[in-house]
Amino acid sequence: TGANITTAAGDCIIAVSLGSGNWLVTHYEPKRARFIAANSSGGLTFDTSQTVATFAIETADEGGNFASSTFTAPRAGMYAFGFSGNILVSSGTTEGELRIGFINAANAYTHNLYISRHYPYASGLFYVPVSFQTVLRLAAGDTVRVGFSKDASITDTVTLDGTRYFHGYLL
């Protein structure tokens, strides 16, 4: 389209010289920012205030943009994110909402992607598997984390199980 391309270290292009210092870019591939993080032990307890989920294991971190359980966008663009894990609920004698979603630097839910009604159960522990994905438009420097909370009406112990996964990448 005749527009300039803003590049960053690690980007790749294929270009053809048109002579006189002019080039035609036939293919442009920005360096992909992507990460996969996991946690294999240590549940986290839901509270009425928002808690940030921790991820102690970085399976992959191309570009070094994931640290302290937080992804920082290296450039503006569309990013895909996903989370999976299990919620463990004790006894199940109260009712209310559990919230889990992606949060920004201001600890506000950018996408409150999972809202679950917690229905009363007779007794015992039960697991609620959770998995969600989204695409977010981010500016350079924007951050994304996983946060969770519960309504004050839920008096049961609710835990985000120790085994959980968080991943993301630049589209």
Image: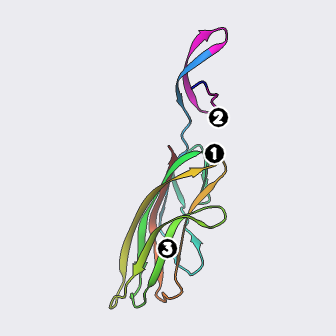
Distance between the alpha carbons at the discs numbered 3 and 1: 28 Å
Q: Is residue 120 left or right of residue 101?
A: left
Up-down: is 81 above or below 53? above
Q: Tell me the kind of residue under disc 1.
A: Pro
Which element carries disc 2, helix, strand or loop?
loop
Distance between the alpha carbons at the discs numbered 1 and 2: 9 Å
Residue 97, given in percent of the width and then of the height, sits at: 46, 80
Residue 166, given in percent of the width and then of the height, sits at: 49, 58
Q: Are marks 1 and 2 in contact (CB under 8 Å)?
A: yes
- Residue 42 shows up from this direction: no
Q: Are marks 3 and 1 in contact (CB under 8 Å)?
A: no
Marks 3 and 1: which is nearer the front? 3
Viewer-side residue, 115 vs 143: 115
Residue name at image x 45 percent, y 69 percent = 114
Up-down: is 2 above or below 119? above
Which element carries disc 3, helix, strand or loop?
strand
Q: Which residue is mark 2?
A: 8
Residue 33, given in percent of the width and then of the height, sits at: 55, 44
Residue name at image x 52 percent, y 83 percent = 151
Which element carries disc 1, helix, strand or loop?
loop
Q: Tell me the kind of residue under disc 2.
A: Ala
Q: Is residue 6 magenta?
A: yes
Identify the mark at residue 74; answer none if there is no mark.
1
Position of the N terminus by quadrant:
top right
* Marked residue nearer the N-terminal end (1 or 2): 2
- Residue 164 shows up from this direction: yes
Residue name at image x 67 percent, y 65 percent = 106
Residue 66, given in percent of the width and then of the height, sits at: 59, 52
Viewer-side residue, 110 vs 67: 110
Q: Which residues are magenta?
A: 3-22
* Marked residue nearer the N-terminal end (3 or 1): 1
Q: Is residue 11 magenta?
A: yes
